[in-house]
Amino acid sequence: MSIFNISLFNANRDNYVYVITNTKTNKHIIFDPTDAHETLANLENLGGEVSEIFLTHRHHDHVDAVEDVKAIFPQAVVHGGSALELDIVEKHLQDNQEIEILDGLTLKTILTPGHTLDCASYLVSFDDDDSQFLFTGDSLFSMGCGGMFDGRILDEYWNSLKKIKALDDEVYIFASHEYTLANLAFILAIDPDNKKLQEFHAEILQKTQEGIPTYPTTLKIEKEFNVFLRCDDPEFKKLLGYDDTKSDVDIFGLVRHKKSHFILQ
């Protein structure tokens, strides 16, 4: 059994903040701390100390509690991707850069511009466990992806999603918002006759009704159902009314546009 534990808590209504704890040392790293009241209350319940803070991008609902955490844990080092231009960031991480922290945890930065140009995702592995865990912020959600706030940088965003798609199918994915049910409504509007998708929707609906987080998901599940990861699939292109001559990037742009204008019934 791993000495590391991943926990999450709600903040700002639909945000998730993630904490990884080394249960032997009771040291933590935290991803995208926001909502100071919730963040500090949850850290107090955990006890111990925060050694590292990781930010996926600049938006306020991902960084608002950083200074509050630093006020209590001044030794905590704030990390961000190499394009993240915030004064609170103390160490900038390059694409594919690996660091070892928390006495047995390896973290690899994957730059994933698209939602914003400064987005980064973090691939985590533990010395005592074969599993891998990807913290994607708003770059990839369960059954969705973030809107584009720095222009329609379709090539960059699709390339970022391809980086994620290239990872192992069994990677566990933790994203920053609870949008899964709403995202599935959009997918079902595109692919209404997909029986497996209908069954998956029923599972997610039950979880949501019971107040159970829909994370982690896995890359395998996302590749099967998430339309933003299916833009290179000839069968999916056919479903949209196109043949394989339509570029993957064009399909991604089309689906992202549809999602941005989708009205949830």
Image (cartoon, rainbow, N blue to C red):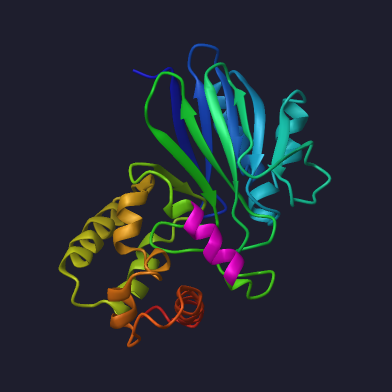
Task: Determine the residue located farthest toward the right in the rendered image.
Answer: 87
Left or right: residue 34 versus residue 207 is: right
Front in this rendered view, residue 82 or 77: 82
The range drawn in magenta is: 155-163
Q: Pick whichever, 114 or 237, lies toward us.
A: 237
Q: Main secondary structure of the magenta part?
A: helix
Q: Please check the rendered image and state whether residue 157 is part of the magenta-colored stretch, yes or no.
A: yes
Estimate the x, y position of residue 83 in percent, counting from the top left.
74, 52
Q: Residue at x 30, y 54 (%)?
A: 221
Q: Quadrant of the C terminus?
A: bottom left
- In the picture as drawn, the residue positioned furthest to the top comes out as 24
Residue situated furthest front in the rendering = 245
Residue 9: % across, % down: 49, 41
Compared to residue 172, the image places residue 28 above or below, namely above
Q: Nearer the viewer, residue 166 or 32?
A: 166
* Above-or-below relation of 150 to 220: below
Residue furthest toward the left?
Answer: 195
Query: x and y percent of residue 222 in the render?
Result: 35, 56
For the question of whether residue 77 can be seen, the reply is: yes
Residue 19 is left or right of residue 71, and the answer is left
Residue drawn where x is 71% and y is 54% of the image: 58
As drawn, 114 above or below 211: below
Can residue 14 be seen in the rendering of this structure? Answer: no
Query: Which residue is at 29% across, 51% downward?
Result: 210
Quadrant containing the N terminus in the rendered view: top left
Q: Residue at x 76, y 39 (%)?
A: 67
| Residue 253 point in image, percent of width and height | 51, 78
